[in-house]
Image (tube, coloured by chain):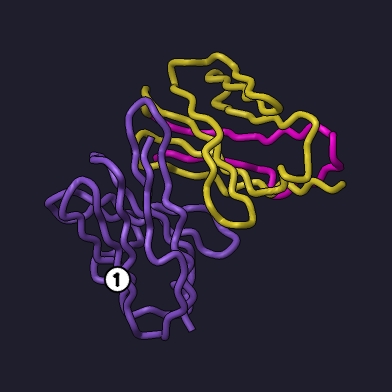
Amino acid sequence: AQKVTQAQTEISVVEKEDVTLDCVYETRDTTYYLFWYKQPPSGELVFLIRRNSFDEQNEISGRYSWNFQKSTSSFNFTITASQVVDSAVYFCALGWGKLQFGAGTQVVVTP
Amino acid sequence: SAVISQKPSRDICQRGTSLTIQCQVDSQVTMMFWYRQQPGQSLTLIATANQGSEATYESGFVIDKFPISRPNLTFSTLTVSNMSPEDSSIYLCSVFRVNTEAFFGQGTRLTVV
């Protein structure tokens, strides 16, 4: 069975602080994808990144960066210099086709 | 990419009634799924919508309660039957393409009163 653990329920930061969201996963599959999605208060799911299980390169996109470590089954997400607009629930997900979602981490950024 | 149109975007329904949610994709996709997100919770997979055959349901979800149709590779419906307040959730349609992202519709926000 697949499992995704996001141990942080809520993280509160002041604007411009960095915030790191943890994601640990379990799977027996050799090929899988990992995803991060953002869900703002409006409710839609906003795709942030997809990572193939064979690609362990870290990635940076603007203020966002991701650290994929297969050895520890982790796929952590960092927001650098957070902004109020980053306030949302962030989900880590695992799968190939159908996805197993973590519980989500609520990020609250205050001015 | 894939553009998913999901209808209705929201509805308020009486308990005991049924609601059918439609999901239209702008291009053919093999893999299509339905998820439920209960208030304050994460997304849970309801079922895989199979084209031309019965849907494949996850543990805890049954066809009598959540009948799904998928007549072709661009369209699917999910019906929430005999609704109770516990069915109040966001229901999301999703499609998956290899080597790309999993695309989600904007969701149907259902409130059962």
The reply to whether the magenta stretch includes residue B100 is no
User: Which residue is rendered at x = 23% and y = 40% of the image?
Assistant: B28
Tag 1 secondary structure: loop
Quick check: A86 above or below A77? below
Residue A104 horizontal side relative to residue B93, left or right:
right
Position in image of residue A80 (x %, y %):
76, 29
User: Which region is colored magenta?
Assistant: A1-28
Residue A43 horizontal side relative to residue A34, left or right:
right
Give the colour of chain B.
purple
Residue B46 horizontal side relative to residue A8, left or right:
left
Position in image of residue A109 (x %, y %):
79, 46
Q: What is the residue that sits farthest to the left in this orientation?
A: B52
User: Which residue is rendered at x = 60% and y = 47% of the image?
Assistant: A104
Q: Which of A64 and A70 is in front in this view?
A: A64
Label 1: few (<14), some or many (≥20) within 10 Å?
A: some
Rendered image quadrant of residue A78: top right
Position in image of residue A26 (x %, y %):
48, 33
Residue identifier under label 1: B65
Give the colour of chain A.
yellow
Circle 1: residue type: Lys
Chain of the residue on which disc 1 is drawn: B
